[in-house]
């Protein structure tokens, strides 16, 4: 009996996933956008601008790019995917889940080291910097360096600067870059590695310094329409984001040209 119930539940879940995009379109809701956590403020502003032009406001879902890519591969019925690095977009593309010809680089970013706003931490970012000493008995907050883009960029930068072995055991891993930012905001970590745009979005942290651009791979945010997309505004919103207006909105929040 339990097997029959499990099979029925699985079948109903698949049916719901298949019908969800059509139901969303019919209810007047906008396209579903899966976006990297660091895009929260900018994508909400872009969605508002799109809605102000008479369109249904897109539904935005934010998480780490790794988690979003896994959701897409599991059958999430979304219209657009914006990753914080190329690796996870490549992963989805290799699975054959992108709308052909829809992939494009949307924006870039910078990587910075932050501390709680009221904490006097002085540290010059460079090769052999005494970051372990600056941490003391505290931790360095990072998005998961094994899977999440911000964490991967951070690990690469710290490795290039020759200090990763000294602090790898002091890393407080978060599910996404906003989780790492929150640890620093609460004072649970003395330092954190986040994007410059995340630091700008918070009044509770201050930037200690920026990592040299050459210490890690270029930070790029690829955007693509998903094969599962059925919303009539999916392609229109993708083009809006890539337009001069869309890029200007991202620029207001500190994102750079890709």
Image: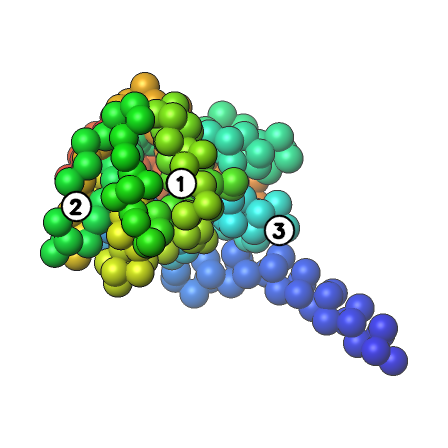
Q: State whether residue 36 is above or below residue 18.
A: above
Residue 41 position in % (x across, y down): 24, 51
Residue at the image position 41 percent from the left and 52 percent from the top: 172
Residue at the image position 74 percent from the left and 65 percent from the top: 11
Taking the image as shown, residue 168 lies to the left or right of residue 196, namely right
Residue that badge 1 annotates? 167
Disc 1 from disc 3: Cα separation:
38 Å
Q: Answer yes or no: do the residues labelled 1 and 3 have beta carbons within 8 Å? A: no
Front-most of 248 and 112?
112
Query: Which quarter of the figure is the C terminus placed in?
Result: top left
**Of callouts 1 and 3, which one flags the residue occurring earlier in the amino acid sequence?**
3
Residue that badge 3 annotates? 75
Q: State whether residue 152 is above or below residue 186.
A: above
Residue that badge 2 annotates? 121
**Of callouts 3 and 2, which one flags the residue occurring earlier in the amino acid sequence?**
3
Between disc 3 and disc 2, the foreground one is 2
Residue at the image position 47 percent from the left and 61 percent from the top: 24
């Amino acid at each position: 009996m339990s097997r029959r119930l499990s099979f029925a539940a699985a079948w109903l879940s698949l049916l719901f996933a298949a019908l969800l995009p059509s139901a969303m379109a019919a209810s007047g809701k906008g396209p579903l956008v899966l976006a990297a956590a660091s895009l929260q403020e900018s994508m909400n502003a872009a969605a508002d601008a799109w809605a102000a032009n008479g369109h249904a406001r897109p539904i935005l879902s934010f998480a780490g790019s790794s988690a979003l890519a896994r959701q897409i591969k599991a059958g999430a019925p979304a219209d657009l995917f914006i990753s914080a690095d190329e690796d996870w977009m490549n992963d989805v593309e290799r699975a054959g889940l992108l709308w052909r010809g829809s992939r494009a680089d949307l924006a870039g970013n910078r990587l910075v080291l932050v501390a709680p706003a009221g904490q006097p931490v002085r540290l010059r970012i460079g090769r052999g910097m005494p970051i372990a000493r600056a941490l003391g008995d505290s931790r360095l907050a990072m998005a998961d360096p094994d899977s999440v883009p911000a964490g991967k960029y951070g690990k690469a930068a710290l490795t290039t600067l020759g200090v990763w072995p000294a602090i790898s055991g002091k890393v407080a891993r978060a599910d996404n870059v906003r989780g790492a930012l929150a640890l620093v905001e609460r004072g649970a970590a003395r330092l954190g590695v986040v994007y410059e745009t995340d630091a700008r979005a918070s009044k509770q942290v201050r930037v200690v310094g920026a990592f040299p651009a050459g210490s890690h791979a270029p930070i790029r945010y690829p955007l693509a329409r998903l094969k599962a997309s059925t919303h009539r505004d999916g392609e229109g919103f993708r083009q809006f984001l890539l337009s001069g207006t869309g890029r200007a909105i991202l620029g207001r929040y500190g994102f750079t040209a890709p």
